[in-house]
Amino acid sequence: MLWIGKKVTTGHLIGYLFVPSLLCMVVPSLIASFLPVFKGELEIVEEKEKTKSRFSGTMLYLGLGAIVFVPIFKMITHLPPYVGMMLSLGVVATFAEIYSSSKFSMTEFDDEESEIHSHHSPVHQSLSKIELPSILFFLGILMAVAALESLGILFGFADSLRETMPQLGTEIHEGGVSDLVVLLLGVGSAVIDNVPLVAASLGMFSEPIDHELWHFIAYSAGTGGSMLIIGSAAGVVAMGMEKIDFFWYLRKISWLALVGFLVGAAAFMVTRTLFLEKSI
């Protein structure tokens, strides 16, 4: 969202966040490797081998390449990222239809054979799994945030945060937004989804493109959600697939995620200092 909102660029985003994000993952994983709760034997249930498509590897690399292509497309054409993403999606969907051996009939929709084969169409199957309530939820959130921004409420809230929050880290960038505010956004993303938080921050602050504030918000909102299993889409999916209990995660994982979040935040502050010294 920050990238689409022209608050960050690809090169600076990687430069600022590569090391902090890496430490945010490595440190908790290293600590967890020494804990008894994460040690044991994994019983693998043998299942019947499914016929592997000879195009599975090609589709994997094509999908990954399509994602990497989006920032390149934006830099070349200067079009919004969603245009490149839709183009990539169209290419992947086209190849999926070509590689699949499904039969889909638009005219004989009542035919039993056509109905059976239509469910094997990759695009048809993917469209059937779209969660419209989730899309409408994010649409409603973004519209509500836009309304608050147009009324000036978000800017007023940002000014009150600047006045009341202790100024941590702002001595580096001459009285900007306190690092505590950004860290609280990260903690908040564990309870509220990071999409509305980032959308709100776009309306709260008016710093220029590639300002360190935007990169810190990207890190905090992106990684802080892991402190609760409900704080990220991946956590909710894992909760359903692996039957992970909310309170088990809270006792065993949340503190590890918090440690990684704080280590990464400290690494970001060091990286930010190096960037600022280089620019002086």
Image (tube, rainbow, N blue to C red):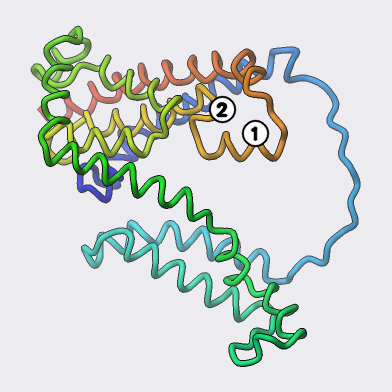
Position of the C terminus, as image quadrant, is top left
Residue to which mark 2 is pinned:
229
Q: Position of residue 278 (x, y in %)?
A: 17, 29
Residue 51 visible in the current orientation: yes
| Label 1: element kind | helix
Residue 152: x %, y % from top left? 10, 34
Q: Amino acid at mark 1?
A: Met
Label of residue 239 in the image: 1
Question: Which sits in the foreground, 127 or 35?
Answer: 127
Tell me the residue at 54%/13% (across/down).
255
Residue 110, quarter of picture: bottom right
Question: Which mark is on residue 194?
Answer: none
Contact? badges 1 and 2 (CB < 8 Å): yes
**Picture quadrant of residue 50:** bottom right
Q: What residue is shown at x 21% (from left), y 13% (from top)?
A: 169
From what the image shows, is residue 238 above or below residue 265?
Answer: below
The single residue placed furthest to the front in the displayed view is: 110
Q: Is residue 176 left or right of residue 80?
A: left
Q: Earlier in the sequence, mark 1 or mark 2?
A: 2
Three-letter code for the amino acid on which mark 2 is drawn: Ile
Q: Residues within 10 Å of mark 2 (few under 14, many from 20)?
A: many
